[in-house]
Image: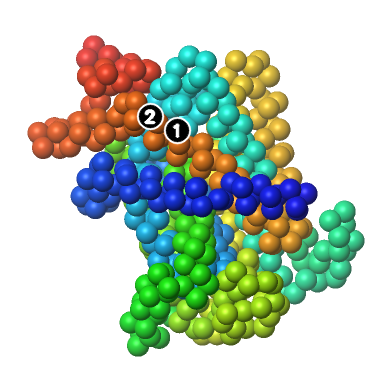
Amino acid sequence: MQEIIGFLNGWIWSPALIYLCLGAGLFFSVITRFMQVRHFVEMLRLLFRPNTTPEGISSFQALAVALSGRVGMGNIAGVAAAIGFGGPGAVFWMWVVAFLGASTAYVESTLAQIYKETDNGQYRGGPAYYFEKFFKGASGKIFGAVFALAAVLACGFFLPGVQANGVANAVAMITGDGTPVSTAFGTVGMNKLIALLFIVLVLGMIIFGGIKRIANVTEIVVPFMALGYVVMALLIVFMHINQVPAILGMIIGDAFSAQAGFGAAIGWGVKRGVYSNEAGQGTGPHAAAAAEVEHPAQQGMVQAFSVYVDTLFVCSATAFMILMTGQYNIQGTLPEGQFLVQHLAADTQINSPAFTQMAVSSVFGAFGNIFVALSIFFFAFTTIMAYYYIAETNMAYLIRKFKSKGFWLFVVKITVMASVAYGALNSSGYIWEVGDVGVGLMAWLNIVGIVVIFLKSKPTISALKDYEDQQKAGVAHFTFDPKKYGIEGATFWENRLKERNSR
């Protein structure tokens, strides 16, 4: 299985996908006239608009759900892996993919809003929905179904294990492995098993409550955990403030003449950047579609801001802590056990939270180790919830005409919890490769799809122009008329406009 996963990972994450992610971000940035910069203030204003309907969630809750998927192991262990395999220059490419990816996040999330629908009292949408409604006919249904299947596999089976593995390893770094216990996956420490049991029980209680409960949990946990983590990083940066120019110089200089190899820096920077901020991956649109907004472009802007929070704030915090404290090794493209730069023991796992935990512990001692472990727990736990919601939404899409819907949604819940158990008990390197397959598969389908949508028509650009025109006109309440711009299949917005006009 490990050989199969390794083969798939190498094929999916070929240079073509690396440059597709960067190219799509640059393309949409130019086409939207860098909306991620022009509308930054508007992004902040829209965050705190309340939800007034029972079907939707607020923009802030949608942001929190999206961030719960974005802010996870990629921010702690993923950044460490990018540095370990791609050198400090990989951080620069993470910044690039985040800045450009914000426009991609706007496009995919606005599409999710335009083509969303109401299903059993809640809003649903995402790539499967907008592919089917835009392309229409058999081709739209096939494309939508293929993405939905990929999303169910990726978010229901491939990705939750990465998060659970990070939590289990973080607990083991604090408490030790504990008494060895023989399992079907080999010998596992008792402390890992206890952590796994706790995660599965709490996860089950939340995901059986639906999107409303997930949103209620994430809107409290996500801001708290992200702010606490960034504050800890700022304290470490302040204590090493004299190193800031040198670290920035190292990151930027190494990005183009990387110790690990120029291609490795770009490859790992983009791979971990996309894994972390998920721009273009097709996961963020699911939460975006669930939001109650006056205009589709509004939630697209909010989701663009979430990319900034994830990479430019949280990922950068991790990178600066690791580089300033010197708690890292750089393996680059060398065989395992050989290093271009070695500051730590050779057996220190690169694909794990180890670099980050050691960085914080080098300043704050045992408290730092515990703090990072708690951060990992909350980051990873909320990400697993987001993955479940995405898997559920796509399963709901696939079974819309089935009678036994409850059974299949129950299967998704059980699959996610089984994936959590599987990931926690396996080796971190293998589990990260499994996660990369899931991310890459969705990214290929979604980015190609949204680029083709743009080439055939320009619904997201039309929505942005419409919103900007209404801004200039100073309207009190925004509206959206899809037929005005020749957008077909946006039945939700057509019906909403009819309701308002009939009042």
How crowded pointer 2 is (Cα within 10 Å; few <14, some 14-19, many 20+) is rated as some
Looking at numbered disc 1 in the image, what kind of residue is underneath it?
Answer: Gly
Residue 260 image point, x, y percent:
53, 72
Residue 300: quarter of image: top left
Residue 183 image point, x, y percent:
87, 57
Looking at numbered disc 2 in the image, what kind of residue is underneath it?
Answer: Ile
Give the answer, above or below, for where 48 lies relative to 238.
Answer: above
Q: In terms of depth relative to the viewer, which is nearer, 436 or 419?
A: 436
Residue 291 image point, x, y percent:
39, 36
Disc 2 designates what residue? Answer: 453
Q: Are marks 2 and 1 in contact (CB under 8 Å)?
A: yes
How crowded pointer 1 is (Cα within 10 Å; few <14, some 14-19, many 20+) is rated as many
Q: In terms of depth relative to the viewer, which is nearer, 15 or 44?
A: 15
> Does the rendering let one see residue 48?
no
In this view, which residue lies farthest toward the right?
Answer: 182
Q: Locate residue 110 relative to residue 219 in the image: left or right.
A: left
Residue 232 image point, x, y percent:
45, 74
Q: Locate residue 455 relative to residue 3 in the image: left or right.
A: left
Q: In terms of depth relative to the viewer, which is nearer, 497 or 324?
A: 324
In this view, which residue lies farthest toward the left?
Answer: 473
Give the answer, above or below, for where 293 lies relative to 185.
Answer: above
Disc 1 designates what residue? Answer: 449
In this view, which residue lies farthest toward the bottom?
Answer: 242
- Residue in the picture at 44% in, 46% down: 20
